[in-house]
Image (cartoon, rainbow, N blue to C red):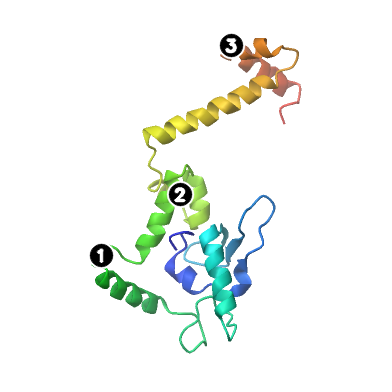
Amino acid sequence: MVDTGVRVGEACAAEWSCVHLEPVTGAKYGYLHIPRGKTRNAKRNVPLTGRVRDMLETRWTAQTNKSRWVFPSEEGAGPVSRSTVRDQHQVLRKKLKLPSEFVIHSLRHTALTRLGESGAGAFEIMRVAGHCSVTVSQKYVHPSPESIERAFERFEAMNTKARAGLPGMTRNQRQQVSPTRLLATVFATVGEGRGR
C-alpha cells in the first residue's frame, strides 16, 4: 500500500489475474489492474515500483497451492479480510510502539503524499488513487519552494525546446527571441494548421 497507494480493500482483494509484471510500452515494472472499488473511478491500472514487483514475484514463487488471490485467507478459499489485516497492523504497531494515529490507511495516505511531493499533480494522483474528484486529490499536493523551482526549470527547458523549433532563425537569434515574437510565431503556426 505504501508503494501503490491502493485502498486496503483493493490490496486484500487483489487477484493474480490482475497482476501484470511485464511492463507496457514505456513503463519500467508493470502494473496492477484494479477492476472495481469504492468509487466510479476505482477501476484503474496502478504502476508498480521495483519493490512491489519484487515482492509479487517472490510471493508467486512461494505460493505452493497457487491461489487465485495474491493474499489468500488462511483457509485459502478467499482473500484475506480487511479486519485481519487491520488487526495484524494493530499488533505490529503496538509492538513497535508506534502512535495509535498510525492506522492501516496511513500507508495509502503516505504513498499519495509522497507521489505529490515527487511532482505529481492532483489529476495524476486522482487517477492513481481512484478518487471520485480532483478536490480529494488536491490535499496530497503540497508544493514546496524547491518543487516550484523544479517546475520552472522544466518549464524553461520546454520554452528552450520551443524556441529551437522556430523556423528560419539561427541558434543565436532563437536564444534572443522575445516572448512577444514567440507568441506571434506560435499564433502564426497555429493559424497555418501546423500546431495540431
Estimate the x, y position of residue 108 in percent, counting from the top left.
41, 60
Q: Where residue 115 is drawn, which disc sits there?
A: 2
Estimate the x, y position of residue 31 in percent, counting from the top left.
59, 61
| Residue 41 seen anywhere in this rendered image of the structure | no
The tag earlier along the polypeptide, 1 or 3, is: 1
Badge 2: residue crowd in 10 Å (few <14, some 14–19, many ≥20): many
User: Nearer the observer, disc 3 or disc 2?
Assistant: 2
User: Nearer the observer, disc 2 or disc 1?
Assistant: 1
The three-letter code of the residue at mark 2 reads Leu
The three-letter code of the residue at mark 3 reads Ser
User: In the image, 124: left or right of 114?
Assistant: right
* Residue at the spot 35% in from the left edge and 61% down from the top edge: 106
Label 2 close to label 1 by CB (< 8 Å): no
Give the image quarter of residue 195: top right
Numbered disc 3: secondary structure: loop
User: In the image, 4: left or right of 22?
Assistant: left
Residue on which the image places disc 1: 98
Query: Marks 3/2: CA distance?
Result: 36 Å
Q: Is residue 144 above or below residue 30?
A: above
